[in-house]
Image (spheres, coloured by chain):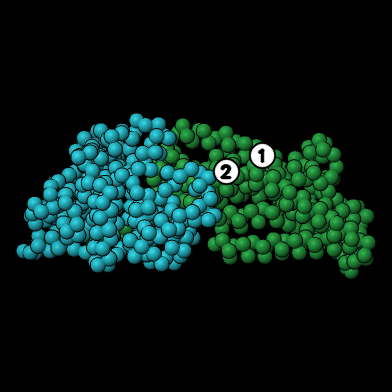
């Protein structure tokens, strides 16, 4: 199995100096489908941005696709970035842009500037873009404007952009946060299929634990910027999940109810 | 801190004191401004001033409308419009690349640094900013006087003066418009391996287009006015004509020309509205 990402002792600090991530050791191979779960503020987004080279670690070693991104020249780093696709929690799409343009922007890292500009005037690959959209049930929105779409539709446009980019590593930050349960399941299915058929790695952060357990082989529990557990999905125990999401402050305020831990486990249901 | 909120004591807004101090500072700065500019509104209502203004205004009516004058007016109006359009076009050619060089919105080094570019890349942006500052810090009328010396009396001096000054203004404001729109789309594209120019066209331009258009049309309107002012120093167009009319105390001709200005500004305003409807 090829190594996609290798992290050893990686740490990142917030702007105010507190540790967002600390002592992260991680090895991710190709064809792996990994879900990152954990309470809000645990560092899930930070870890994904680190893997997307949108953040620079201030400690430890980071290898992505057999390269250390922060020792590359700026141009080589852009080439590496073109091979990694990040699905954002809030899709970063200009409201006035058409869907066809927004999706085809996934390949800007591979296209020459002339082609990119020409595509802005006349979509050069509307067939390919429509195929990516159709997998997410959005084929009819090809020429709609982004501000005409709902939150869940926009999120799928963001996913279609990464499918169209066809990267060697797909990172997804809460990719189904604004979708209903059925659509969320279907969308994760599409992402997993993509990873499987193309033999690439998929790393997604999710707040719905049941979706993570259902669709992913490997679960990484993140808490307070550290890895709490990292194991196969079928070996994760309810106790581990309860400990991962236990919220001391909320429990104190709510006055310890006898079934407090049981309610905490159910929070992450979608 | 936490205990004060739970015991019901009013929470003090930490921004209140700085805001109060800033207000006082602004007032303290405003007073010397009034003092040193020697603004005295009373002079305006002085007996002599009102009479002088009244005679000039009385001459305004009826507007000059003989055929010969109208033909002259038409020609000068076209010349003024031509000066403004040619000047703006040249200014855009300079301002577009300069604003891309000067803006922080397309910084690659800012990506892993929460949107703050590294000091090195920021210092590389300085030459572009410095050029824009030099271009716009010299008033267009001074540039016009310089160019009248260089290329002689006529429209080309006005065109060059507008091109130079407005390149400075447009470049600065464009760069700031790029920075003020939502940065996430461009950053996401840069983080996906896109080149900076492609990220600009796909990530910044769609959100910035409306502001860019409306500012550009407004500047074109200013260029029409500026070309009139520069006409007074011999740079052609309506201004030169108005200078002549004023010297001959032909109030009716001045009035007709002012009416044309009004129409030109109205035209610019309508154009701006129309373009904003298309782009915003």
The residue closer to the viewer here, B130 or A253, is: B130
A91 vs B82, left or right, is left
The image position of residue A7, as x and y in percent, is 23, 37
From the image, state the color of chain B.
green
Circle 1 packing at 10 Å, graded few (<14), some (14-19), many (20+), is many
The local secondary structure at tag 1 comes to: helix
Q: Indicate the quadrant containing the C terminus of chain A: top left, top right, bottom left or bottom right.
A: bottom left
Q: Chain of mark 1?
A: B
Q: What is the chain letter for disc 2?
A: B
Residue drawn at x 80%, y 44% is B156
Tell me what residue is drawn at x 53 percent, y 49 percent: A117
Label 2 sits on residue: B99
Quarter of the image holding residue B111?
Answer: top left
Residue nearest the viewer, comparing A242 with A231: A231
Is residue B77 in sight in this rendering?
A: yes
Residue tagged by mark 1?
Answer: B135
């Amino acid at each position: 199995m090829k190594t996609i990402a290798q992290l050893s002792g990686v740490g990142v600090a917030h702007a105010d100096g507190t540790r967002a991530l600390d002592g992260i050791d991680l090895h991710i191979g190709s064809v792996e489908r990994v879900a990152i779960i954990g309470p809000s503020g645990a560092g899930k987004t930070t870890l994904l941005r680190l893997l997307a080279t949108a953040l620079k670690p201030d400690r430890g070693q980071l290898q992505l696709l057999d390269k250390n991104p922060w020792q590359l020249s700026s141009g080589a780093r852009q080439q590496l970035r073109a091979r990694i696709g990040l699905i954002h929690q809030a899709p970063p799409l200009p409201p006035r842009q058409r869907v066809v343009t927004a999706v085809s922007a996934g390949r800007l890292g591979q296209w020459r500037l002339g082609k990119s500009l020409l595509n802005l005037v006349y979509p050069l690959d509307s067939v390919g873009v429509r195929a990516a959209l159709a997998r997410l049930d959005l084929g009819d929105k090809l020429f709609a404007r982004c501000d005409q779409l709902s939150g869940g539709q926009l999120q799928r446009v963001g996913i279609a952009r990464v499918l169209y980019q066809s990267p060697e590593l797909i990172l997804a930050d809460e990719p189904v946060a604004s979708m209903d349960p059925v659509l969320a399941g279907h969308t994760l299915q599409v992402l997993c299929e993509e990873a499987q058929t193309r033999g690439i790695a998929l790393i997604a952060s999710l707040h719905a634990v049941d979706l993570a357990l259902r669709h992913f082989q490997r679960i990484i529990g993140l808490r307070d910027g550290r890895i709490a557990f990292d194991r196969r999905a079928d070996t994760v125990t309810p106790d581990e999940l309860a400990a991962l999401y236990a919220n001391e402050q909320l429990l104190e305020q709510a006055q310890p109810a006898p079934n407090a831990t049981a309610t905490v486990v159910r929070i992450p249901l979608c | 801190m936490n205990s004060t909120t739970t015991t019901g004591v009013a929470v003090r807004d930490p921004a209140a004191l700085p805001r109060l101090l800033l207000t006082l500072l602004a007032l303290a700065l405003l007073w010397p401004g009034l003092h040193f500019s020697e603004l005295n509104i009373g002079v305006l209502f002085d007996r002599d001033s009102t009479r002088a203004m009244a005679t000039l205004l009385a001459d305004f009516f009826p507007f000059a409308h003989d055929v010969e004058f109208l033909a002259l007016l038409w020609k000068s109006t076209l010349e003024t419009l031509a000066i403004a359009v040619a000047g703006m076009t040249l200014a855009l050619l300079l301002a577009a690349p300069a604003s891309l060089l000067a803006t922080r919105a397309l910084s690659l080094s800012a990506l892993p640094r929460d949107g703050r570019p590294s000091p090195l890349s920021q210092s590389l942006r300085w030459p572009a900013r410095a050029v824009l500052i030099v271009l716009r810090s010299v008033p267009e009328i001074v540039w016009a006087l310089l160019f009248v010396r260089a290329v002689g009396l006529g429209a080309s001096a006005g065109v060059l003066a507008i091109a130079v000054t407005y390149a400075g203004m447009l470049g600065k404001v464009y760069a700031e418009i790029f920075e003020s729109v939502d940065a996430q789309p461009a950053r996401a594209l840069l983080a996906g391996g896109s080149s900076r120019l492609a990220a600009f066209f796909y990530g910044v331009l769609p959100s910035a287009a409306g502001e860019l258009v409306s500012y550009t049309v407004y500047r074109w309107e200013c260029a029409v006015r500026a070309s009139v002012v520069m006409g007074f120093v011999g740079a052609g167009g309506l201004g030169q004509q108005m200078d002549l009319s004023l010297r001959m105390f032909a109030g009716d001709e001045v009035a007709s020309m002012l009416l044309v200005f009004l129409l030109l500004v109205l035209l610019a305003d309508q154009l701006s509205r129309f373009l904003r409807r298309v782009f915003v």
